[in-house]
Image (tube, helix red, strand yellow):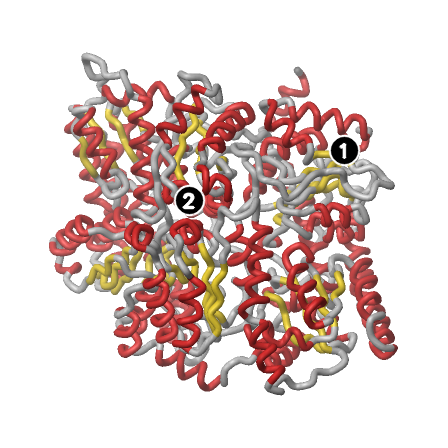
């Protein structure tokens, strides 16, 4: 009998491996019209070959398992970094259900966003009525301090004009005239989620800072995280800035929103950068962005409209963090505190402790452009060798920058940047030119299964492991976290490969 | 091991003290937060069920109120995500920009057996990744080329479906023409599906459109084969499982019971299903429909066109399982009927053990549900079997016929909410204080922050199966572990609690 032990109820993990279900599976095959098992096996083998790889890389129209999402996802992540802000997505409503589910599965937190729920009639007549009604309803129900509007591809294809619609909605009394409703057009057929982040941050800052330019600076430094999914990074940035004694504004800070305490009460809006601070960001001394390719337009806008210097640092690994501290110190004239120097020393100590297990290890990695640059910085520092670097949402500037980074180190000599490629391409790369370790998001587990390349989960989304997003990958603390995940995954794999008694377990060492 | 009983869960819930009039008052209060126009619209979707009424007294399957934070998805989600996606040996192209396919990639736990990427494709994401030029110049050429490429790279695919995203219908692409041409070229089934996300008011229209695509692009192949005399005569006991998506293996823990009573399950729609099974379905003697909402269309079509009767059944909880097995068996001869009794008897000990263990731990606990188009009524008897009480339920995308069917499952005074907004749901739950909320991922952490035990009722919270006798044991275990977790008692700092008591 299937559930034969009431104290050990079997779910899908075990239940279906019992005899009665195995028989059921065998019986079902009769009706499936499946292929001959030998043909399946042969075909599976063929997909591992160079011949298949060439065919795979020759495709021009088909994308399989891409490592990128679309613009509005990034836009609403930007929006929830501001105090009391409700993201409002103008267009079809299914998109919002998808975005909310996606973030919720990653962060294991509530994520609120509304849709203007456009349907066929809006496709014909435009979505202005949906905007007017939607703003009125969301303003009444959810009492936000700001509503940040972006678009789905439906609204973009039919050419809805957000500026005009919002003006008209205000005229119709949906929200008060002075109520901030920044917006960004975020077509999903242009760029990716990181483009959407850029557009929304620019839209929000442009709206809030209007008329706020003062005669003198406020002495602060603006810090823009980019499409950041590590809450630990936001907290680490703030901690470092506080330690150095920098007066800063994080634009924007979604750390409390995406990691709120459970005190028995649900609050839709948690923390966030105040609208006052955001408005005053125009008067800062300078802006530092931690990602380049999710802040291209925003930085350009800050440079040109605010006449404020901007720079990009990626505080990943030792030198990346060094650069951040030096930058902070240079901008503020404050010395780098001893505490951080000691942290640096401890992180470097950790790296030297583990270096023997990392040296010359061949790595494959994929992710967003800035994440990949940060990881490559780190890998080169520890003597690992990036081999396959896949970035689906790549661009020419990024590839140039990454190549220059790879060229700085002999450990980067064996790397190829595969811009615009997807995870099915990476599968071919891993079969034909195997590596020791794969770094990527949860979707990397399919590559792990197929190619047996051990996976370190770093990136977005991470659905199948808990709490990794709570950690930092930035700063010296982050360097230790990265090191911990990477070296211990390699050591776990080593144990797995030496675990057969009287066969491989000669190397099943206690001390490593 | 049995975890310790907890004292933190209240013995009685406020809900019990509320009359129907109180609950109607609650609805009115909650509606006050809306502007007038929206208030008027939403008022029609909220009600309290009164015993003896023939329906729940709510309007449904109407456009969501803009800005209300509906939980609903879109037609694409209904077609690609629900109906077509699980057909494992076909490649389902998310045709349009990259997002829709990305967000729905591997999200739904439609289990299947097969070698992914070789003869099965369920947990993969195939997309035409539209760029601006595709919007401007149209995507038909790209689509046609893409199908050629995927057939070369995945030669064991049995066919292709084209799942339209919003732009396709707006830019005037002719995917039907591409489908016909490509089908000839690769010599396989190519199904165009017009499930653009802006069509209709929810996932529901996507189900309908997907059903129609099966009718128009798959069944003609059956007709052709039948005419040519290539369809073998089935047995008297041939049935199909319709509307089981095999979440966590649900269809398997259902199929095993149907096989045990002597039926021959020829096809599974669509969890762990194949194109071949789909094509052969019109040869069955009876269609067994689990998810009525998403598959009633094709069932009715098969009834009208092929004379195949269909029967709704419910495999949640032993009471309904036994009743369903008997109802199904009654459509067949005495052998099947006798076997149905044997099967019911066979699982009796297992079920009794489950109830003996878990019912005392769950007895009297209240639950509020909000799911898609079937479970807001279908899972209720499983809760009843465990001694739990339903105090509120509603559908994301149910229709009037669903609310009519719901009346057989709910008690007098149950709060009914259709297409509930985040605001309404939160307010209702705050007031009714159920012991357990059972809904979706978007709701889960809202209520867990409110210190309320929660189970996802779409994905089974990564557990399952919940169908059938084997599934019921898992269901009972999971409700217990949600309700009786010691973690809930940690919420709230003790010094704060102490301060509150003395204040």
Q: Residues within 10 Å of mark 2 (few under 14, many from 20)?
A: many
Instruction: Assign the C terminus of chain B to one quadrant of the image.
Output: top right
Q: Regarding mark 2 in the picture, which secondary structure is present there?
A: helix
In which quadrant of the rendered view does residue A313 lie?
top left
Front label number (2 vs 1): 2
The chain letter under disc 1 is B
In the rendered image, residues at marks 2 and 1 fall on the same chain: no
Q: Residue at x 29, y 58 (%)?
A: A365
Residue corresponding to mark 2: A154
Q: Position of residue B244 (x, y in %)?
A: 64, 62
For residue A155, side relative to residue B201 (left or right)? left
Question: Can residue A511 be seen in the rendering of this structure?
Answer: no
Q: Residue at x 85, y 77 (%)?
A: B333
Q: Position of residue A443 (x, y in %)?
A: 41, 58
The chain letter under disc 2 is A
- Whether residues under marks 2 and 1 lie with C-beta atoms below 8 angstroms apart, the answer is no
Question: Can residue B103 be seen in the rendering of this structure?
Answer: yes
Instruction: Assign the N terminus of chain B to one quadrant of the image.
Output: bottom right
Q: Position of residue A164 (x, y in %)?
A: 37, 28
Residue B13 shows which numbered tag? 1
In which quadrant of the rendered view does residue A507 lie?
bottom left
Most foreground residue, B232 or B177: B177
Most foreground residue, B443 or A341: B443
Most foreground residue, A67 or A480: A67
Q: Regarding mark 1 in the picture, which secondary structure is present there?
A: loop
């Amino acid at each position: 009998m299937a559930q034969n032990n009431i104290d050990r109820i079997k779910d899908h993990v075990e239940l279906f491996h019992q005899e009665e279900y195995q028989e059921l599976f065998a019986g079902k095959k009769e009706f499936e019209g499946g292929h001959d098992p030998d043909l399946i096996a042969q075909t599976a083998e063929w997909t591992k070959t160079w011949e298949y790889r060439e065919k795979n890389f020759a495709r021009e129209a088909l994308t399989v398992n891409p490592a990128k999402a679309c613009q509005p996802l990034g836009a609403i992540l930007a929006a929830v970094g501001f105090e009391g802000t409700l993201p409002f997505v103008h267009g079809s409503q299914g998109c919002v259900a998808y975005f909310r589910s996606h973030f919720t599965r990653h962060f294991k937190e509530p994520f609120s966003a509304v849709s203007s729920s456009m349907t066929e009639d809006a496709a014909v007549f435009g979505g202005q009525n949906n905007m007017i009604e939607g703003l009125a309803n969301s303003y009444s129900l959810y009492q936000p301090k700001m509503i940040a509007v972006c678009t789905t591809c439906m609204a973009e294809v039919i050419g809805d004009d957000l500026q005009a619609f919002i003006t008209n909605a205000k005229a119709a009394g949906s929200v008060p005239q002075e109520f901030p409703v920044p917006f960004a057009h975020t077509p999903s057929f242009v760029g990716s989620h990181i483009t959407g982040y850029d557009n929304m941050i620019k839209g929000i800052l442009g709206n809030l800072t209007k008329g706020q330019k003062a005669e003198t600076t406020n002495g602060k430094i603006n810090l823009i995280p980019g499409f950041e999914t590590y809450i630990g990074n936001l907290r680490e940035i703030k901690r470092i800035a506080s330690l150095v004694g920098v007066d800063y504004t994080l634009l924007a800070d979604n750390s409390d929103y995406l990691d709120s305490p459970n005190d028995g009460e649900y609050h839709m809006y948690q923390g966030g950068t105040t609208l006052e601070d955001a408005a005053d960001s125009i008067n800062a001394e300078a802006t530092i962005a931690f990602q380049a390719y999710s802040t291209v337009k925003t930085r350009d806008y800050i440079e040109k409209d605010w006449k404020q210097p901007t720079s990009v640092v990626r505080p990943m690994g030792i030198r990346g963090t060094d650069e951040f501290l030096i930058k902070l110190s240079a901008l503020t004239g404050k010395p780098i505190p001893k505490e951080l120097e000691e942290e640096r020393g401890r992180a470097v100590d950790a790296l030297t402790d583990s270096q023997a297990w990392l040296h010359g290890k061949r790595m494959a990695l994929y992710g967003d452009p800035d994440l990949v640059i940060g990881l490559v910085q780190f890998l080169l520092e520890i003597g690992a060798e990036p081999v396959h670097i896949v970035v689906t949402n790549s661009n020419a500037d990024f590839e140039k920058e990454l190549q220059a980074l790879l060229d700085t180190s002999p450990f980067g000599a064996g790397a190829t940047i595969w811009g615009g490629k997807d995870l099915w391409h990476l599968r071919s790369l891993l079969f034909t030119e195997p590596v020791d370790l794969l770094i990527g998001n949860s979707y990397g587990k399919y590559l792990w299964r197929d190619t047996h390349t051990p996976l370190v989960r770093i990136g977005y989304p991470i659905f199948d492991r808990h709490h990794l997003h709570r950690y930092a990958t930035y700063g010296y603390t982050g360097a230790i976290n990265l090191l911990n995940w990477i070296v211990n995954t390699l050591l776990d794999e080593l144990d797995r490969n030496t675990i057969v008694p009287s066969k491989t377990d000669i190397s099943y060492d206690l001390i490593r | 091991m049995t975890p310790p009983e907890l004292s933190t869960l209240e013995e009685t819930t406020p809900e019990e003290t509320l009359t129907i009039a109180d609950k109607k008052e609650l609805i009115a209060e909650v509606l006050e937060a809306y502007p007038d126009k929206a208030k008027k619209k939403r008022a029609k979707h909220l009600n309290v069920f009164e015993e003896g009424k023939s329906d729940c007294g709510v309007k449904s399957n109407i456009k969501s109120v803009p800005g209300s934070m509906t939980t609903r998805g879109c037609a694409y989600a209904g077609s690609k995500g629900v109906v077509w996606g699980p057909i494992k040996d076909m490649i389902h192209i998310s045709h349009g920009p990259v997002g829709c396919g990305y967000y729905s990639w591997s999200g739904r736990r439609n289990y299947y057996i097969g070698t992914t990427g070789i003869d099965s494709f369920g947990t993969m994401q195939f997309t035409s990744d539209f760029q601006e030029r595709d919007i401007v110049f149209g995507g038909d050429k790209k689509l046609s080329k893409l199908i050629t490429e995927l057939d070369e790279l995945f030669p064991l695919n049995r066919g292709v479906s084209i799942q339209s995203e919003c732009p396709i219908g707006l830019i005037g692409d002719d995917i039907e023409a591409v489908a016909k041409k490509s089908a000839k070229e690769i010599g396989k089934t190519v199904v165009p599906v017009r499930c653009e996300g802006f069509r209709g008011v929810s996932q529901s229209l996507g189900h309908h459109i997907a059903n129609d695509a099966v009718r128009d692009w798959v069944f003609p192949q059956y007709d052709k084969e039948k005419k040519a005399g290539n369809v073998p005569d089935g047995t008297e006991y041939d049935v199909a499982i319709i509307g089981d998506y095999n979440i966590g293996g649900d269809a398997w823990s259902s199929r095993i019971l149907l096989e045990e009573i002597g039926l021959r399950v020829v096809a599974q729609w669509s969890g762990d299903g194949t194109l071949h099974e789909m094509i052969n379905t019109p040869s069955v003697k009876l269609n067994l429909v689990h998810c009525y909402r998403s598959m009633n269309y094709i069932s009715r079509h098969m009834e009208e066109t092929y004379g195949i009767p269909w029967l709704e059944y419910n495999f949640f909880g032993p009471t309904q399982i036994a009743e369903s097995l008997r109802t199904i068996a009654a459509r067949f001869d005495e052998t099947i009927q006798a076997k149905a009794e044997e099967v019911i008897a066979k699982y009796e000990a297992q079920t009794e053990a489950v109830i003996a263990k878990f019912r005392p731990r769950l007895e009297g606990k209240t639950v509020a549900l909000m799911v898609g188009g079937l479970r807001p009524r279908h899972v209720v008897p499983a809760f009843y079997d465990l001694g739990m009480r339903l105090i509120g339920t509603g559908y994301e995308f149910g229709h009037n016929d669903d609310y009519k069917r719901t009346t057989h499952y709910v008690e007098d005074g149950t709060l009914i909410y259709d297409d509930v907004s985040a605001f309404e749901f939160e307010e209702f739950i705050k007031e009714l204080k159920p012991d357990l909320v059972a809904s979706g991922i978007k709701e889960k952490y809202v209520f867990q922050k409110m210190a309320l035990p929660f189970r996802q009722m779409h994905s089974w919270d990564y557990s399952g199966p919940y169908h059938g006798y084997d599934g019921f044991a898992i269901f009972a275990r999971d409700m217990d572990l949600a309700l009786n977790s010691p973690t809930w008692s940690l919420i709230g700092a003790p010094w704060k609690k102490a301060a509150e008591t003395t204040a």
